[in-house]
């Protein structure tokens, strides 16, 4: 700085140097205070850990509600320096899942297992298959095929089954976004159906439908080349009819699912 240069090289006083250069002495003598940002950093880290998708203004107002005196300019400076203004990807938190023993129901409509599969047409466009199975006699109740199968579509298929077959007491699913949606949860509550989630990474807790999925993959999806969605639906209906009425199941004493149903 020029003031310091004049003082050291020419031996003038600070007052004379500042007057000559028209620099206020208070400006020259100012010493910045060390910034203690750690309380703000810790508060923001705690917020982001608890609310991964939180934005700046939500962070600022939450800190104010907790009684912190920091203004928005200071919070934003630290918020940006921490990289929190960059869009963050976060995993959706799941509630703790309790292990549910895989048991064989004693009657139909006691437990249904529901799961998704995916494959692609010859053009490369992906489609999905929604499989719904009655755990009692391994009967495939529905195979819904489409490019997109959101939670609303899952509920629609279940409502159709309610008309033709009735509803189960329990539905077992994994932790897919369609199954953890508020829409399906509310619908099951209204119908007095217990919605049971398997533990993440434990597909065999839904073993009946997983075993069925293996047959679908081997005998239907991998065995055919599909050009249109209509072809997939047609083949799926043919496969489901054969699976339910003609295919002997070792677990059912080499009976078909419908044979066991008619026998009872």
Image (cartoon, grey):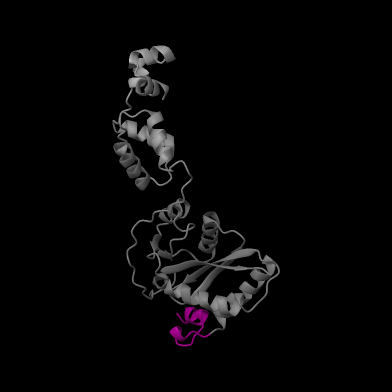
- Percent x, y for residue 9? 37, 23
Of residue 18 and residue 180, the one placed in the foreground of this image is: 18
**Residue bounds of the magenta highlight:** 248-264
- Where's the N terminus, which quadrant? top left
Of residue 144 and residue 32, the one placed in the foreground of this image is: 32
Of residue 13 and residue 220, the one placed in the foreground of this image is: 13
Q: Is residue 4 magenta?
A: no
Q: Is residue 187 left or right of residue 149?
A: left
- Percent x, y for residue 44? 35, 40
The relative height of residue 11 versus residue 77 in the rendered view (above or below) is: above
- Where's the C terminus, which quadrant? bottom left
- Please say whether residue 22 is visible from this viewpoint: no
- Percent x, y for residue 251? 44, 84
- Percent x, y for residue 30? 33, 22
Of residue 4 and residue 163, the one placed in the foreground of this image is: 4
Q: Is residue 7 left or right of residue 108?
A: left
């Amino acid at each position: 700085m020029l003031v310091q240069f004049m003082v050291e090289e020419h031996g003038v006083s600070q007052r004379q140097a500042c007057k000559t250069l028209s620099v206020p002495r208070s400006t020259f003598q100012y010493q910045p205070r060390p910034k203690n940002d750690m309380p703000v950093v810790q508060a923001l880290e705690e917020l982001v850990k608890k609310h991964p998708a939180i934005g700046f203004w939500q962070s600022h107002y939450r800190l104010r509600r907790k009684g912190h005196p920091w203004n928005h300019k200071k919070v934003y400076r630290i918020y940006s320096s921490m990289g929190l203004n960059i869009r963050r990807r976060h995993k959706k938190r799941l509630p703790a899942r309790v292990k549910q023993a895989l048991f064989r129901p004693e009657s139909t409509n006691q437990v249904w297992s529901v799961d998704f599969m995916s494959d692609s047409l010859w053009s490369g466009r992906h489609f999905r298959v929604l499989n719904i199975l009655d755990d009692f006699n391994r009967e495939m109740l529905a195979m819904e095929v489409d490019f997109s199968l959101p939670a609303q579509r899952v509920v629609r298929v279940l409502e159709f089954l309610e008309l033709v077959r009735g509803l189960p007491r329990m539905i077992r699913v994994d932790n897919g976004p369609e199954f953890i949606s508020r829409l399906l949860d509310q619908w099951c509550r209204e119908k007095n159906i217990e919605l049971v989630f398997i533990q993440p990474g434990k597909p065999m807790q839904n073993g009946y439908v997983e075993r069925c999925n293996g047959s679908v993959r081997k005998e239907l999806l991998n065995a055919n080349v599909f050009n249109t969605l209509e072809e997939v639906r047609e083949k799926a209906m043919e496969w489901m009819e054969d699976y339910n009425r003609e295919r002997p199941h070792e677990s059912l004493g080499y009976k078909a699912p419908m044979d066991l149903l008619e026998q009872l």
